[in-house]
Image (spheres, grey):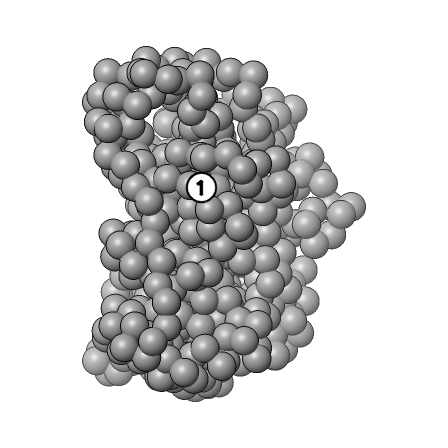
Amino acid sequence: MKVEQIYTGCLAEAAYYIESNGEAAIIDPLRETKPYMDKAERNGAKIKYILETHFHADFVSGHIDLSKKTGATIVFGPTASPGYEAHVAKDGEELQLGNVKIKVLHTPGHTMESTTYLLIDEKGKENSIFTGDTLFIGDVGRPDLVQKVKADVTPQILGGYLYDSLRSKIMPLPDELIVYPGHGAGSACGKNMSKETTDTLGHQKQVNYALRADMTKEEFIKAVTDGLVEPPQYFPLNVLMNLKGGIESIDDIIAKGKHPLSPKEFQTVWESMEALVLDTRSKETFAAEHIPGSIYIGIDDNFAPWVGTLVTDLEKPILFLAEQGREEEVVVRLSRVGYDNAVGYLNGGIAAWKEAGFETDSLKEISPEDFATLYEMDSQHINLLDARRKSEFDSEHLVGAENFPLDFINNNMSQLDRNKKYYIHCAGGYRSVIMASILKSRGYDKVVNIRGGYKGLSQTGLKKTHYVEPTTML
């Protein structure tokens, strides 16, 4: 028996490969199918099952494409009603995989169809559980996402189901079981996930607040519903894609998006299709020189979740700039969150753009030290925007800073004054460059990025505070 976690840091998502005696099962695969097929081929195994723990909100699953290419059966837990061929398993049903069995445990709460898969080894011993978004390391799945699709399914209702599922299906299992969750720290599917991506069930019973033995249902519901922030806007759209099916094959998406365009072709497509121009290079490269009107979201950070949070139209045609050799990576990572309409990239990059006679722009920046000097001289007349999340801001921020989270820039941008100069920082510089690029593209020309973010500013001696000031905006 072989169990392998396939972890994708950008989405903080874990897929799983289980193999026994020449048969394999894939749990919660991402959009791209080749890695799973290649792994099975290398091991001389045939993919028999594709197990889905639920209809995912934070990414588009590759289950349909993978099933078509391998003939594997898609499996969902009870109550699921997918718009394509799949096996909807019964609670307690056992699936034979080589010499092992996988038992279906219906664990509603994160969603109604949420299911945990219990792996039973060759000797009939319970080995591990694949919990999807039901149980994380240090946390449990948030119960409010279904409401974005079905308004009558409230977080309180799902919280009650989740309480019962954990206590009737998971907590009675042996302490030595390995817990394999669907996500780790950084995912928006929970509130307080650990950086660890596996643990024993016994240890989780000791340290996970949601598994406290003497917790009442009322206490549990309050704990899992308090402090929830609005989920990224693409979540319900991804749920519907995973639920209904009928989506494009990843191969077709790559072929369409990995299309080199000359500067003139790039400009023509931009204008004719009213496309979004996305610059995925490093933040330093973008700041130094970029195409006027382009949006920066760098590939070397939480690229896909930020695209999903900030680009409100999944059907929007996307043109992009990428470091040479990373064009396919950009297209694949866009497709993971449902952005299937990448239509080409700038062949030759900025150098070719300039050679063709097109203009470029740059982003004004300032070092933390120079900003500190400026701020100490005239703090009353400096507009400082902190692009971090509210929880980060509440923990510690500079006196006089205004919390303006990047997550909600589309809702709050109208509160800014185009005639004012704004200095922007985040934690390390990634989000602030994204924010500055969005503001510049919308006509806010007087923006200055503080290089190094709060990490750099906190070392300059500027006064910090730990409480929320009245200027904070949600």
Residue 145 as seen in the image, left or right of residue 11: right
Q: Nearer the viewer, residue 459 or 89?
A: 459
Q: Is residue 223 above or below residue 54?
A: above
Q: Pointer 1: what residue? A: 446
Residue 438 as seen in the image, left or right of residue 379: right
For the N terminus, which image quadrant? Answer: bottom left
Residue 84 as seen in the image, left or right of residue 99: right
Residue 18 on image: x %, y %: 33, 66
Residue 44 on image: x %, y %: 24, 82
Q: Is residue 348 above or below residue 106?
A: below
Could you tell me which secondary element the residue under label 1 belongs to? loop
Label count reads: 1
Which residue is depicted at the point 43% across and 28% down?
384
Which residue is depicted at the point 46% across and 46% down?
445
Q: Nearer the viewer, residue 228 or 392?
A: 392
Which residue is depicted at the point 24% across and 28% down?
370
